[in-house]
Image (cartoon, coloured by chain):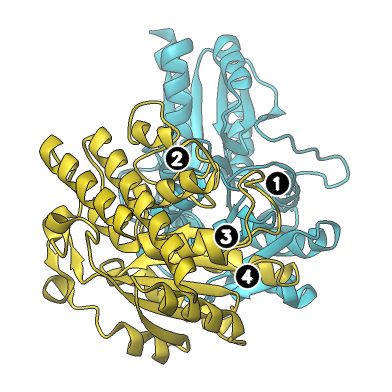
Amino acid sequence: MAEAIATREAYGKALAEFGAKYDKLVVLDADLANATKTEIFKKAFPDRHFDCGIAEGNMMCVAAGLATAGFIPFASTFAMFAAGRAFEQVRNSIGYPHLNVKIGATHAGISVGEDGATHQCNEDIALMRTIPGMTIINPSDAVEARAAVEAAINYYGPVYLRFGRAAVPVMNDAATYKFELGRGILMAPGSDVTIIATGLMVEIALRARELLATDGVSARVINIHTIKPLDEEIVLAAATETGAIVTAEEATIIGGLGSAVSELLSEKRPTPVVRVGIEDLFGQSGPAKELLSVYGLTAENIAEKAKKALSMKKQ
Amino acid sequence: MEQAKIQELRRIATDIRIGIIEAVYNAGSGHPGGSLSIADILTHLYFVEMNIDPSNPNKEDRDRFVMSKGHTSPALYSVLAHRGYFPVEYLKTFRKTGSHLQGHPDMKGTPGVDMTTGSLGQGFSVACGMALASKLKGDTFRVYTVIGDGESQEGQIWEAAMFAPHYKLDNLTLVLDYNGLQIDGRTVDVMNPTPHDEKFLAFGWNVINIDAHDFCQIESAFAAARECKGRPTAIIAKSHKGYGVSYMLDQASWHGKAPNKEQYEQALTELKAYRASI
């Protein structure tokens, strides 16, 4: 069993690591440094960490102001408040002027667990996708999360980084892993169907691939860490070469990765797409693992939906 | 202040008011009332107070200005044009398709605009971020922002009002354009935000009350703000909406409406006559 680390933990450590290398990096928090793990940065660089109190709208705009003067601010809070409460500040004061602000959104998705529906942000990907010029990164594990932070620092423009609360298995090899903004990663080859997954669903998709293999189905698995801009090339190739697609994300199926893939394929290469994600529902309290199962974010459900996509291909 | 200097500033402010009327009339829409109320403050900022260079609008150590009440962009554009950031003629393109002069300020489209604003409450917070950036760089520039008294009904104003004294942003000066009117009527009737001065005092600000149309009071308020250490300054500037145009004076109905041809001509006649009398 691989080691399990929460991507928020990797995020906090990465900020502290890169704080030494990039002197323009500053971090803003809204009374959640302990939970977003930015406290690791705060300890290392107390003069470059600014708590804004429980005032997320103000925090996003303060970040915008810092960015106008050449700083690279990471504004951190839970996804619910970063993408939800402060949506309009992000849209008008960061997105519209295309300022170099990085939004470090932790506690995204249903895996927040026991805090329940008010804190389980399943809508953030959909919301952020609608902002012109916004880059969205949803890392699949701790190795990818660290690399994503450095890629965001080296890219000029607004970036929404999505991190999880729960510990997830580390699948990528830190020694060889390379992150390329906007490029999907072929995790495993396959010829009958392609599972396009993001975030913690990538590891679950790899398990679904094994289930499918026992039934004689060859499934390709692609990791889309950058949801916007979407790697069209890898998706179109998968559609052409396997003819059936399943998407998997720990977010609402409305407006997220599944939508992005469907929009692309319906216009450029019509192909059956079946979406796995949170259906049109709010979450509830419970342990993360149980909730993933209750809401269908499992290897079994992905395998079943892969078969459904396959059957659509044959019609 | 010397009388000659006051007269010069009055002439400039009147030219800026003429530019506001030209912009809004030619656009057929826009916000003349609150633009006219803030014209004297902007004249002082851009012609006396701020360290700026119109030939180098992005100069790193320049003082910053954020028009948090972004709908009064005609005042900002007119002062920028008259200060030499772009030709005064451009004011006639205001709000037209393809123009550099968007309905609300766009930092990417207009030289001299330091921040994109329009959604009320946000510019003030951005100004706080700029002031913090200046502190991190060793206090290399000062930051100025204008909010409306109606705008102070936004909750985010008070988030920023908490932030600035907490981080001791004494390089930040806020002007509250206290004209007492908003779209729906008198601010005290719509949702009473007063007393402004006592609120900012309670939040830890250095507070100065002035007449927004008196250049001597304006100058001494900004001078006092520069002298004040350890906390930001809020200048509560009692103004008149529509100042300079008789039929617009203190009328909420002129918040967001363009004059017709006859009204436009009357406004220009009045402003030009006043300018000649200075």
Residue wearing tag 1: A148
The part of the image, by quadrant, that contains residue A14 is: bottom right
B238 versus A112 height, above or below:
below
User: Residue B132 bears which disc, if any?
Assistant: 4
The residues tagged by marks 3 and 2 sit, at their Cα atoms, a distance apart of 27 Å
**Residue A180, horizontal then vertical, whole percent:** 73, 34
> What's the residue type where badge 4 is placed?
Leu
The alpha-carbon separation of the residues under discs 4 and 3 comes to 12 Å
Alpha-carbon neighbours of circle 2 within 10 Å: few (<14), some, or many (≥20)? Answer: some
Share a chain, discs 4 and 2?
A: no
Residue type for callout 3: Arg
Q: Colour of chain B?
A: yellow
Q: Which residue is mark 3?
A: B64
For numbered disc 2, what is the local secondary structure?
loop
What's the amino acid at mark 2?
Ile
> Badges 2 and 1: C-beta atoms under 8 Å apart?
no
Subunit of label 3: B
Mark 4 or 1: in front is 4
Residue A142, horizontal then vertical, whole percent: 71, 53
